[in-house]
Image (cartoon, rainbow, N blue to C red):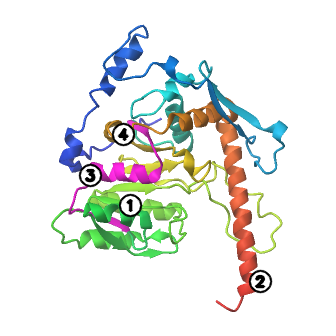
Amino acid sequence: MTAKPHSVDLSEFFTETTRVRDNSPLKSLTKYMEADPTLLSLGAGLPHPSTFPFAQIGAHVAPAGASVANTAPADMLNVSVTTSSGAIEGLGKFLQYGNGRGVPSYAAFTREHTHRVHDPKYVDWDTVVSLGNTDAFVKALMLFYTSGDTLLVDEWTYPAIIGTVVPMNIQLAPVRMDAEGMVPEALDHVCTNWTGERKLRMVYTIPTAQNPTGATMSIARKRAIYAVAQKHNLVIIEDDPYYYLQFEPYTADSEDRYTNLPGIKSLVPSLLSLDTDGRVIRLDSFSKVLAPGLRCGWVTAPKYITDKIQFHNETSIQQPAGVSQAIVASLMNEQWGHSGWERHLVQIQRDYAMRRDLFVDLCLKHLNGLV
């Protein structure tokens, strides 16, 4: 078996702010406190866990592969975290200040899941927590971009991205799209003929169910986009919150519409899974497949990049809310596991496929010939 390569070093594109960003002085003390549990530190401003008025937090959750609407109350799973939880950390850990990497059991699940689904092709990859993909996008962008830079985007891009970059005085360079999203030849043309004062360094795209067009890239399209990024030495932000919502194209009156759902194993491979250089920064989120109010996600990239995002987290969000991390960590590590998580994703795929088909059926019935 050929050994995986080390990522290409793209830190030459870091902004000056990113270059000097380092571990928070307060958070750097954590390793000493964790190494000696008898140590009572007065330096980090940590409230004593005995003062927390919470003895237990949790939720009633549908079994993996089922919906709340179709599950009797007696069959609900009890996701519970107490002060002395077993397979994951106790409640005191989740409710305490933490570092920008996330509570270990939550972070470990994201790494294992990423390994199982995407199997990154270079050795020094890692994950770091986020509050979802908008938060993750801002952190990834600010690694490399400052006022006056230009970001490559789909010609019809996610509106929240426009709202994010315009106040930062970051310009957008639109790239032509077709039914599969960004066109590789168009991306190459924009980069080859670029005459701006500052070099183009990053391309942002949503490869699955692109917002707002709904376009989804094939594996061939992803390979071509990645090749152009290699040619022009671009960083790719792969914003993929809809990745698991893949299903077959609409077919009228088909009896097996919902029998060939991809689950995880048959999903179109991600850009991350093709990345041998470490130039893809992948943004993942539980928002579309658990609940957006949890504000839980993660970023995958070379460790020298995830370290910088961790340091940025430590002086901004710190990490997702401990209550949210506790519920997700308990659900994934103690109740569903990876196999249950896949059954849940199949259920979500089936639900959205049924909704899509009903919508198209009604359009054909009531709007046929009118639009």
Of residues 183 and 369, the one drawn nearer to the viewer in this rendering: 369
Q: CA distance from mark 4 to mark 3?
A: 16 Å
CB contact under 8 Å: marks 4 and 2: no
- Relative to residue 207, is residue 18 drawn left or right? left
Report the residue marked by disc 2: 365
Task: Note whether 160 is above or below 28 in the view shown.
Answer: below
**Residue 244 highlighted magenta (yes or no):** no
CB contact under 8 Å: marks 1 and 3: no
- Residue 195 place in picture, x, y as percent: 18, 72
Looking at marks 4 and 3 on the same chain, the residue that comes earlier in the sequence is marked by 3
- What is the crowding at mark 2: few (fewer than 14 residues within 10 Å), some, or many (at least 20)? few
Q: Residue furthest left?
A: 197
Q: Which mark is residue 313?
A: 4
- Relative to residue 291, is residue 279 drawn left or right? left
CB contact under 8 Å: marks 4 and 1: no
Q: CA distance from mark 1 to mark 2?
A: 38 Å
Task: Note whether 208 is above or below 315 in the view shown.
Answer: below
- Relative to residue 204, is residue 215 drawn left or right? right
Q: Residue furthest top?
A: 38
Report the residue marked by disc 1: 204
Q: Which mark is residue 144?
A: 3
Residue at x-position 78% and y-position 38%: 76
- Circle 1: residue type: Tyr
| Element carrying mark 3 | helix
